[in-house]
Image (cartoon, rainbow, N blue to C red):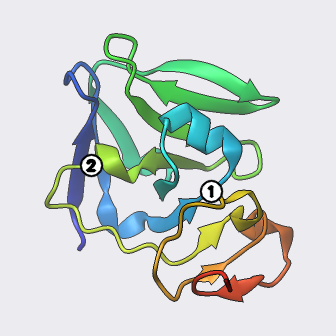
Amino acid sequence: MSGQAKGHCLCGAVCFEFEHDAGQAFHCHCESCRRAASSVVTTWITVPRGKVCFTNGEPKYFSSSPGVRRGFCGTCGSPLSYESPVHPDDVDLYAASLEPDVIVEPEFHVYSDEQLPWFEVHDELPRYGGSITSGKPPVRKGVRNS
């Protein structure tokens, strides 16, 4: 899907839009993302910073680790974004905060080494043990071996 995509927090106090054809989607299994979202896995869409526009309200930010900012709604607490010095020109947006008509097609998994032992995503996407920016090849494709 190309064109404008929209999203918002639970209460609607913070709304955003972006050029959807600019993004790349992936699943993250790291402990930090899991805890920030209270979810077993987080699905992100990465968008160039200049393509994201907050159309209502502004997120509040929490520094979860050095240089990392996690955006959230100051009213309802919904997590909305992730920003890192590793990719300073991009913003990661929680795919779950997007409008239902926005089609998100994840391309890979990251931090599969931190994946919860009792949860599995049944797809054949490549799984990276850590960050995709590490330059290391995927540790596997598809689900874990029993």
Q: Is residue 83 visible?
A: no
Q: Position of residue 131 (x, y in %)?
A: 75, 63
Task: Give the residue pinned by disc 1.
Answer: 29
Q: Quadrant of residue 16?
A: top left
The CA distance from mark 2 to mark 1 is 20 Å
Residue name at image x 37 percent, y 74 percent: 105
Are the residues flagged by discs 2 and 1 in contact, CB closer than 8 Å? no
Task: Give the residue pinned by disc 2.
Answer: 98
Residue name at image x 68 percent, y 86 percent: 145
Mark 1 or mark 2, which is nearer the start of the sequence? Answer: 1
Q: Is residue 93 visible?
A: yes
Q: Position of residue 69 (x, y in %)?
A: 64, 30
Callout 1 crowding tier (Cα within 10 Å): few <14, some 14–19, many ≥20: many
Q: Quadrant of residue 9?
A: top left
**Viewer-proximal residue, 30 or 95?**
30
Q: Position of residue 101 (x, y in %)?
A: 14, 61
